[in-house]
């Protein structure tokens, strides 16, 4: 079962936000299964799928996201 985290970010901050997300994931040694995004204006949506629930929870907390599954 995958644990999906959704994060909404301002479209004009997308590039900076992706870099922060990747840096956090790498720094914590987390390996998400899937990383998807929808570029919308004014809010873009990122979905990150984790195999480990605790990793999904920590990621959601770190970036103000919500766990969908």
Image (tube, rainbow, N blue to C red):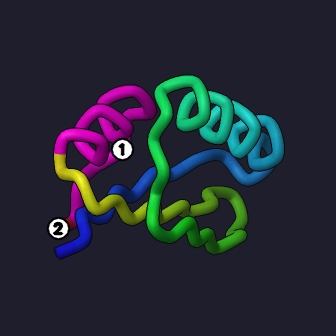
- Badge 2, how many Cα within 10 Å: few under 14, some, many 20+? few
Q: Nearer the viewer, residue 16 or 54?
A: 54
Query: What secondary structure predominates along the stretch shown in magenta?
Result: helix
Residue at mark 2 to residue at mark 1: CA–CA distance: 12 Å
Kindly state the secondary structure of the residue where label 1 is placed. Answer: loop
Give the x, y percent position of residue 25: 54, 37
- Please state if 59 lies on the left or on the right of 28 as rendered: left
Q: Quadrant of the N terminus?
A: bottom left
Q: Nearer the viewer, residue 13 or 27?
A: 27
Q: Which residues are drawn in magenta?
A: 54-68
Based on the displayed image, in which of its 4 quarters is residue 67 positioned? Answer: bottom left
52 up-or-down from 68: above or below: above
Based on the displayed image, in which of its 4 quarters is residue 48 positioned? Answer: bottom left
- Please state if 38 lies on the left or on the right of 64 as rendered: right
- Badge 1, how many Cα within 10 Å: few under 14, some, many 20+? many
- The numbered dot on residue 65 is 1
- The numbered dot on residue 69 is 2
Q: Nearer the viewer, residue 27 or 19?
A: 27
Give the x, y percent position of residue 37: 61, 69
Kindly state the secondary structure of the residue where label 2 is placed. Answer: loop
Residue shown at the point (39%, 58%) measured from the top left: 6
């Amino acid at each position: 079962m995958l644990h999906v985290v959704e994060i909404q970010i301002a479209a004009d901050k997308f590039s900076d936000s992706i870099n922060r997300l990747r840096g956090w994931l790498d720094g914590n040694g987390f390996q998400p299964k899937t990383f998807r995004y929808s570029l919308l204006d004014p809010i873009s949506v990122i979905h990150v799928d984790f195999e480990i629930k605790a990793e999904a929870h920590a990621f959601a907390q770190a970036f103000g996201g919500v766990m969908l599954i």
